[in-house]
Amino acid sequence: MFHKSRRIATSLYLGSLALTLFVAFAAEGMTGQGAVLIVLMLIQYVAIAWYCLSYIPFARRTITNCCKSLVGM
């Protein structure tokens, strides 16, 4: 799980998971709590998708190139 090619995605996923639980349960009544939770959940989904793509040969490179072509870089 902490292989050098997956370390960043794993850390982002676990960190955002912990922060999501903290914001959901410990920071009740916080202003903008819903928006923060949505952002943290989006980070979780992107991190786990990036982690899963690391198991498919050339998948990360293909997705990166597609995003670059959409942005026009």
Image (tube, helix red, strand yellow):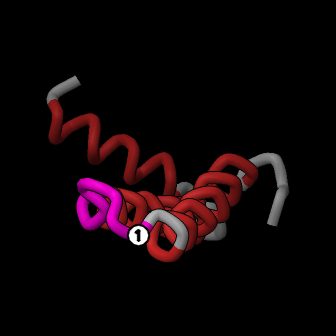
Of helix, strand and loop, which mostly describes the magenta segment? loop
- Residue 2 in the image: x percent, y percent? 83, 58
Q: Nearer the viewer, residue 48 or 30?
A: 30
Quarter of the N terminus within the rendering: bottom right
| Residue 13 falls in image quadrant | bottom right
Residue 43 at what x, y percent from top left? 43, 58
**SS at mark 1?**
loop
- Can residue 9 be found in the magenta stretch? no
Q: Is residue 52 left or right of residue 42?
A: right
Q: Position of residue 67 (x, y in %)?
A: 27, 44
Q: Residue at x 50, y 67 (%)?
A: 20
Specify the quadrant of the image occupied by residue 40: bottom left
Judge by depth and name the residue closer to the eye, 23 or 29: 29
Q: Is residue 52 above or below residue 12?
A: below
Could you classify mark 1 by the number of other residues whose Cα lies within 10 Å: few (under 14), some (14-19), or many (20 or more)?
Answer: few
Above or below residue 44? Residue 58 is above
Residue denoted by label 1: 28
Residue 48 in sight from this viewpoint: no
Q: Residue at x 56, y 66 (%)?
A: 22
- The foreground one among 15 and 7 is 15
The residue located at (54%, 69%) in the rendering is 26
Q: Position of residue 3 (x, y in %)?
A: 84, 55
Stretch of the chain drawn in magenta: 28-35
52 sits left or right of 10 in the view: left
Instruction: Please name the amino acid that badge 1 sits on.
Output: Glu
Residue 8 visible in the displayed image: yes
Residue plotted at (67% across, 47% down): 8
User: In the image, is 54 to the left or to the right of 26?
Assistant: right
Quadrant for the C terminus, please: top left
* Closer to the camera in the image, 51 or 54: 51
